[in-house]
Amino acid sequence: MDVRKIVVVVEDVDVSRKALQWSLHNLLRYGDLLTLLHVFTATKSRNKKKARLLRLQGYQLALSFKEICNSNFFNTNIEMVVTEGDQEGRKIVAMVREIGASVLVVGLHHQSFLYRLALGHDNIANSLSCRVLAIKQPELSPPPPLRAKTRERLPPLDSSTTMDFSQIEISGLHVPDIPPPKIPYRICPSPSAIIWRARGSRKKKSCSNGGA
Protein backbone atom coordinates (compact mmCIF):
# COMPACT_ATOMS: atom_id res chain seq x y z
CA MET A 1 0.00 0.00 0.00
CA ASP A 2 1.41 3.36 -1.07
CA VAL A 3 1.99 5.98 1.60
CA ARG A 4 -0.16 9.02 0.95
CA LYS A 5 0.78 12.53 1.99
CA ILE A 6 -2.22 14.40 3.37
CA VAL A 7 -1.91 18.14 4.04
CA VAL A 8 -4.44 19.88 6.30
CA VAL A 9 -4.41 23.68 6.37
CA VAL A 10 -4.31 24.95 9.95
CA GLU A 11 -6.36 28.08 10.62
CA ASP A 12 -7.84 29.50 13.80
CA VAL A 13 -11.44 28.87 12.72
CA ASP A 14 -13.86 26.17 13.81
CA VAL A 15 -14.39 24.76 10.32
CA SER A 16 -10.65 24.12 10.02
CA ARG A 17 -10.78 21.93 13.12
CA LYS A 18 -13.86 20.19 11.75
CA ALA A 19 -11.98 19.52 8.52
CA LEU A 20 -9.16 17.86 10.47
CA GLN A 21 -11.59 15.71 12.43
CA TRP A 22 -13.35 14.73 9.22
CA SER A 23 -10.01 13.71 7.71
CA LEU A 24 -9.09 11.59 10.71
CA HIS A 25 -12.34 9.61 10.53
CA ASN A 26 -12.99 9.48 6.78
CA LEU A 27 -9.76 9.94 4.85
CA LEU A 28 -6.60 8.91 6.65
CA ARG A 29 -5.50 5.33 6.83
CA TYR A 30 -2.69 3.50 8.57
CA GLY A 31 0.76 4.57 7.37
CA ASP A 32 -0.30 7.88 5.81
CA LEU A 33 1.78 10.99 6.47
CA LEU A 34 -0.26 13.90 7.82
CA THR A 35 1.17 17.40 7.52
CA LEU A 36 -0.40 20.23 9.52
CA LEU A 37 0.40 23.35 7.50
CA HIS A 38 -0.01 26.85 8.93
CA VAL A 39 0.94 29.95 6.95
CA PHE A 40 0.87 33.24 8.86
CA THR A 41 0.65 36.57 7.07
CA ALA A 42 3.88 38.42 6.49
CA THR A 43 4.23 41.73 8.35
CA LYS A 44 4.62 44.86 6.20
CA SER A 45 6.77 46.58 8.81
CA ARG A 46 9.32 43.72 8.75
CA ASN A 47 9.44 43.76 12.52
CA LYS A 48 11.42 40.66 13.48
CA LYS A 49 9.95 40.60 16.98
CA LYS A 50 6.41 40.62 15.62
CA ALA A 51 7.30 37.96 13.07
CA ARG A 52 8.68 35.72 15.83
CA LEU A 53 5.49 36.25 17.83
CA LEU A 54 3.32 35.30 14.84
CA ARG A 55 5.45 32.21 14.25
CA LEU A 56 5.13 31.21 17.90
CA GLN A 57 1.35 31.68 17.83
CA GLY A 58 1.18 29.64 14.63
CA TYR A 59 3.23 26.88 16.20
CA GLN A 60 0.96 26.81 19.26
CA LEU A 61 -2.08 26.65 16.98
CA ALA A 62 -0.54 23.75 15.07
CA LEU A 63 0.14 22.00 18.39
CA SER A 64 -3.53 22.30 19.32
CA PHE A 65 -4.40 20.62 16.02
CA LYS A 66 -1.88 17.89 16.75
CA GLU A 67 -3.58 17.29 20.11
CA ILE A 68 -6.81 16.68 18.21
CA CYS A 69 -4.98 13.98 16.27
CA ASN A 70 -3.54 12.45 19.43
CA SER A 71 -6.95 12.39 21.12
CA ASN A 72 -8.33 10.25 18.31
CA PHE A 73 -7.71 6.55 18.07
CA PHE A 74 -6.20 6.91 14.60
CA ASN A 75 -2.51 6.01 14.38
CA THR A 76 -0.65 8.09 11.79
CA ASN A 77 2.59 9.96 11.25
CA ILE A 78 2.21 13.68 11.94
CA GLU A 79 4.46 16.61 11.07
CA MET A 80 3.91 20.34 11.55
CA VAL A 81 5.00 23.07 9.16
CA VAL A 82 4.71 26.73 10.20
CA THR A 83 5.93 29.32 7.72
CA GLU A 84 5.43 32.92 6.64
CA GLY A 85 3.48 33.73 3.50
CA ASP A 86 0.71 35.68 1.80
CA GLN A 87 -3.09 35.72 2.06
CA GLU A 88 -3.63 34.81 -1.61
CA GLY A 89 -2.48 31.23 -1.09
CA ARG A 90 0.68 31.32 -3.20
CA LYS A 91 2.79 30.11 -0.28
CA ILE A 92 0.36 27.27 0.45
CA VAL A 93 0.53 26.22 -3.20
CA ALA A 94 4.33 26.23 -3.10
CA MET A 95 4.44 24.21 0.15
CA VAL A 96 1.90 21.66 -1.10
CA ARG A 97 3.96 21.16 -4.25
CA GLU A 98 7.19 20.91 -2.25
CA ILE A 99 5.71 18.31 0.11
CA GLY A 100 4.34 16.35 -2.83
CA ALA A 101 0.90 16.04 -1.27
CA SER A 102 -1.65 13.57 -2.54
CA VAL A 103 -4.61 15.37 -0.95
CA LEU A 104 -5.08 18.89 0.43
CA VAL A 105 -7.84 19.34 3.02
CA VAL A 106 -9.14 22.85 3.68
CA GLY A 107 -11.86 24.13 5.99
CA LEU A 108 -13.90 26.38 3.72
CA HIS A 109 -15.03 29.76 5.09
CA HIS A 110 -15.75 33.23 3.70
CA GLN A 111 -12.12 34.39 4.03
CA SER A 112 -10.58 31.18 2.69
CA PHE A 113 -7.57 31.51 0.41
CA LEU A 114 -9.26 29.14 -2.06
CA TYR A 115 -11.55 31.93 -3.21
CA ARG A 116 -8.61 34.22 -3.96
CA LEU A 117 -6.78 31.36 -5.61
CA ALA A 118 -9.79 30.64 -7.82
CA LEU A 119 -9.72 34.22 -9.15
CA GLY A 120 -6.37 33.59 -10.81
CA HIS A 121 -6.67 29.90 -11.74
CA ASP A 122 -9.28 28.12 -13.81
CA ASN A 123 -8.56 24.81 -12.11
CA ILE A 124 -7.43 24.86 -8.47
CA ALA A 125 -6.51 21.19 -8.39
CA ASN A 126 -4.13 21.59 -11.34
CA SER A 127 -2.39 24.54 -9.70
CA LEU A 128 -1.86 22.49 -6.53
CA SER A 129 -1.02 19.25 -8.39
CA CYS A 130 -3.14 17.21 -5.98
CA ARG A 131 -6.70 16.45 -5.04
CA VAL A 132 -8.43 19.19 -3.02
CA LEU A 133 -11.13 18.52 -0.43
CA ALA A 134 -12.93 21.65 0.79
CA ILE A 135 -14.90 20.88 3.96
CA LYS A 136 -17.82 23.23 4.45
CA GLN A 137 -20.22 23.60 7.35
CA PRO A 138 -23.85 24.50 6.68
CA GLU A 139 -24.47 28.22 7.00
CA LEU A 140 -26.57 29.28 9.98
CA SER A 141 -26.88 32.83 8.70
CA PRO A 142 -26.26 34.49 5.30
CA PRO A 143 -22.74 35.86 4.70
CA PRO A 144 -22.21 39.59 5.26
CA PRO A 145 -22.66 41.70 2.10
CA LEU A 146 -19.57 43.00 0.33
CA ARG A 147 -18.71 46.67 0.64
CA ALA A 148 -19.80 48.98 -2.13
CA LYS A 149 -16.23 50.05 -2.85
CA THR A 150 -15.03 46.62 -3.88
CA ARG A 151 -16.38 44.70 -6.85
CA GLU A 152 -14.62 41.44 -6.07
CA ARG A 153 -16.99 38.51 -5.94
CA LEU A 154 -16.33 35.07 -4.61
CA PRO A 155 -16.22 32.56 -7.46
CA PRO A 156 -18.04 29.24 -7.06
CA LEU A 157 -15.64 26.53 -6.00
CA ASP A 158 -17.82 23.59 -6.96
CA SER A 159 -17.91 24.44 -10.67
CA SER A 160 -14.84 22.35 -11.52
CA THR A 161 -15.52 19.61 -14.05
CA THR A 162 -12.76 17.33 -12.75
CA MET A 163 -12.93 14.90 -9.88
CA ASP A 164 -9.75 16.35 -8.35
CA PHE A 165 -11.71 19.04 -6.52
CA SER A 166 -14.52 18.16 -4.13
CA GLN A 167 -16.59 20.36 -1.88
CA ILE A 168 -17.99 18.38 1.04
CA GLU A 169 -20.68 19.85 3.27
CA ILE A 170 -20.94 18.42 6.75
CA SER A 171 -23.61 18.96 9.38
CA GLY A 172 -23.82 18.22 13.05
CA LEU A 173 -25.90 15.43 14.47
CA HIS A 174 -29.39 16.46 15.50
CA VAL A 175 -30.60 14.72 18.63
CA PRO A 176 -34.40 14.70 18.77
CA ASP A 177 -36.16 15.76 21.95
CA ILE A 178 -36.93 12.67 23.97
CA PRO A 179 -39.92 13.04 26.33
CA PRO A 180 -39.32 11.97 29.92
CA PRO A 181 -40.54 8.48 30.79
CA LYS A 182 -44.02 8.27 32.22
CA ILE A 183 -44.17 7.36 35.90
CA PRO A 184 -47.12 5.06 36.69
CA TYR A 185 -49.68 6.64 38.99
CA ARG A 186 -49.75 5.02 42.39
CA ILE A 187 -53.15 4.80 44.12
CA CYS A 188 -52.74 5.75 47.75
CA PRO A 189 -54.90 4.01 50.37
CA SER A 190 -57.93 5.86 51.65
CA PRO A 191 -57.07 8.31 54.46
CA SER A 192 -60.24 7.32 56.34
CA ALA A 193 -59.08 3.74 56.38
CA ILE A 194 -55.82 4.79 57.98
CA ILE A 195 -57.69 6.82 60.62
CA TRP A 196 -60.09 3.95 61.32
CA ARG A 197 -57.18 1.58 61.88
CA ALA A 198 -55.53 4.06 64.18
CA ARG A 199 -58.73 4.49 66.25
CA GLY A 200 -59.31 0.79 66.34
CA SER A 201 -55.87 0.13 67.72
CA ARG A 202 -56.38 2.73 70.46
CA LYS A 203 -59.76 1.25 71.48
CA LYS A 204 -58.32 -2.18 71.69
CA LYS A 205 -55.52 -0.89 73.84
CA SER A 206 -57.99 0.84 76.28
CA CYS A 207 -60.07 -2.35 76.66
CA SER A 208 -57.03 -4.34 77.54
CA ASN A 209 -56.17 -1.82 80.24
CA GLY A 210 -59.72 -1.96 81.73
CA GLY A 211 -59.65 -5.73 81.93
CA ALA A 212 -56.47 -5.56 83.83
Image (tube, rainbow, N blue to C red):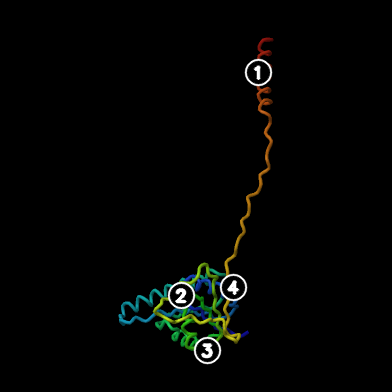
Report which quarter residue 170 is drawn in.
bottom right
Q: CA distance from mark 1 to mark 3?
A: 100 Å
- Residue 5: image location, x then y, percent: 54, 83
Q: Which mark is residue 93?
A: none
Disc 3 target residue: 122
Looking at the image, is mark 4 or mark 3 nearer the viewer? 3
Disc 2 target residue: 11
Would you say 187 lies left or right of 110 here?
right
SS of the residue at dot 4? helix
Q: Residues within 10 Å of mark 1 (few under 14, many from 20)?
A: few
SS of the residue at dot 2? loop
- Residues at badges 4 and 1 in contact (C-beta under 8 Å)? no
Q: Residue at x 31, y 77 (%)?
A: 49
Residue type of the residue flagged with mark 1: Arg
- Residues at badges 3 and 2 in contact (C-beta under 8 Å)? no
Would you say 182 lies left or right of 13 here?
right
Ranked by sequence position, the earlier of labels 2 and 1 is 2
Q: CA distance from mark 4 to mark 1?
A: 75 Å
Looking at the image, is mark 2 or mark 4 nearer the viewer? 2
Residue 175 sits above or below residue 179 on the image:
below
Disc 1 target residue: 202
Ranked by sequence position, the earlier of labels 4 and 3 is 4
Front residue (pair 144, 80): 144
Residue type of the residue flagged with mark 4: His
Ranked by sequence position, the earlier of labels 2 and 4 is 2
Front residue (pair 184, 56): 184
Residue type of the residue flagged with mark 2: Glu
